[in-house]
Image: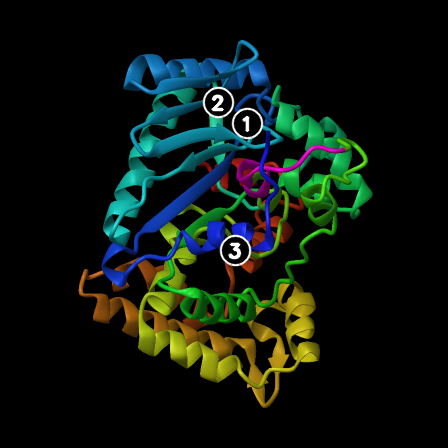
């Protein structure tokens, strides 16, 4: 018989992620769009299955099966999985330095290119599917995705687009205590620029056996873990902190890793909290709405978001420098963005309006891994 879960059980699950600083690690989740190089359309499950089998045969990955379908691979502490729209994701091993993260991702890209090129498959480093509507995206044979396809339209209008049409390079970081987690979460949410995580009331009904779909059934900690995975804030709390906001723009950018210098250094973390401490809810919401449109040129108080970016980037550099692993070089491309005030998105828009003659198709070559 399942023992009823309590609020304390749910809190204890999250608290079990607390680690002393010497055990903090960096975890990376690297997503990319697979596409047929001849048609530029997303690859089908049949093509993905061929990719997974090819990676397993050539590079020794163990297959993960569901109902006789290969849906992922595992090798040591690394996993390759499929997102709902067939996005190819590497969930990397917990590593100590950005050098190890960079090597891990590049090794993964070498492998997928070696197999993919023989199959006429390319991989695109972009945050949003650039050409096709939602209904044209292939579906994967995964039970969880089927559940989410039915659920998402009930709680919003863009959930399915998030599932099927987006990619990200996500970094996962540790915390030492509840207070440390709170400080890191607040700093991260302020810089995303803002995300709001609302836990659905359904989990409360489930905990007391009153979920209409499963009357009398009580949840397990595995259900709690699955529940956390159904939420899509820009920063998500599990037994570690997931930075979900940065969108893919080539692996060499490593922009998502700026958070390592900010959150794994006490002085830099405090600098972020001091900078954002008096921001009002209205200002945070304004940044969330306007920054995706006007980028670093967005006005903020007596200056621009570019001024904030310069300060944040310097804090990150200082934090990485104090870590002592010679990691500051990974922020060189962000340096260029802040120096010029021109974002990667603005560069692509200029190409679209000029060289590409308002065609989106050239992006598949421009951002091909």
Quarter assignment of residue 280: bottom right
Observer-nearest of 108 and 304: 108
Q: Is residue 209 left or right of residue 278?
A: right
Query: Taking 303 as reference, is 343 above or below it?
Result: above
Query: Which of the two labelled residues, at mark 2 and mark 1, occupies the earlier sequence position?
Result: 1
Disc 1: CA contacts within 10 A as few (<14), some (14-19) or many (>=20): many
The residue that appears at 53% across and 83% down in the rendered structure is 277
| Between marks 3 and 1 in the image, the one whose residue lies nearer the viewer | 3
Q: Which residue is mark 3?
A: 11
Q: Which residue in the structure is indicated by mark 2?
A: 121
> Would you name the residue on which mark 1 appears?
35
For the record, the magenta segment spans 216-225
Alpha carbon separation for disc pair 3 and 1: 41 Å
Q: Is residue 243 above or below residue 219?
A: below
| Horizontal relation, residue 213 to residue 338: left or right | right
State if disc 1 and disc 2 touch (CB < 8 Å). yes
Answer whether residue 5 is magenta in the image. no
| Image x and y of residue 177, in percent | 39, 65
- In the rendered structure, which disc, 2 or 3, sits on the residue that comes first in sequence? 3
Q: Quadrant of residue 132?
A: top right
Q: Residue 217: say if magenta.
A: yes
């Amino acid at each position: 018989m399942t023992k009823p879960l309590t609020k304390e059980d749910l809190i204890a699950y999250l608290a079990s992620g607390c680690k002393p600083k010497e055990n903090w690690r960096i975890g990376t989740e690297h997503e990319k769009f697979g596409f047929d190089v001849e048609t530029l359309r997303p690859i089908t499950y049949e093509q993905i299955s061929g990719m997974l089998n090819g990676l397993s045969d050539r590079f020794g990955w163990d297959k993960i099966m569901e109902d006789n379908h290969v849906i992922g691979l595992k090798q040591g502490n690394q996993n390759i999985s499929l997102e709902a729209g067939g996005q190819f994701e590497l969930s990397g091993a917990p590593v100590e330095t950005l050098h190890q993260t960079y090597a891990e991702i590049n090794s993964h890209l070498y492998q997928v290119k070696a197999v993919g090129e023989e199959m006429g498959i390319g991989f695109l480093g972009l945050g949003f599917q650039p050409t096709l509507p939602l209904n044209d995206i292939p579906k994967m044979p995964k039970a969880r995705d089927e559940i989410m396809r039915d659920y998402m339209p009930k709680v919003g209008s863009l959930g399915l687009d998030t599932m099927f049409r987006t990619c990200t390079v996500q970094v996962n970081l540790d915390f030492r205590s509840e207070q440390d987690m709170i400080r890191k979460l607040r700093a991260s949410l302020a810089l995303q620029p803002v995300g709001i995580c609302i836990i659905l009331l359904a989990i409360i009904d489930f905990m007391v056996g009153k979920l209409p779909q499963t009357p009398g059934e009580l949840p397990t900690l595995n259900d709690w873990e699955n529940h956390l995975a159904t939420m899509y804030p820009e920063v998500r709390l599990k037994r570690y902190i997931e930075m979900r906001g940065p969108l893919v723009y080539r692996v060499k950018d490593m922009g998502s890793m700026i958070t390592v210098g900010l959150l794994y250094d006490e002085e830099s973390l405090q600098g972020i909290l001091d900078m954002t401490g008096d921001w009002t809810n209205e200002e945070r919401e304004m940044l969330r709405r306007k920054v995706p449109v006007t980028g670093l040129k967005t006005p903020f108080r007596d200056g621009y978001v570019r001024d904030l970016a310069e300060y944040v980037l310097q804090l990150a550099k200082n934090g990485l420098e104090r870590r002592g692993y010679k990691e500051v070089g990974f922020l060189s491309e962000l340096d260029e963005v802040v120096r010029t005030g021109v974002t990667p998105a603005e560069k692509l828009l200029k190409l679209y309006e000029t060289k590409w003659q308002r065609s989106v198709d050239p992006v598949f070559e421009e951002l091909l891994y």
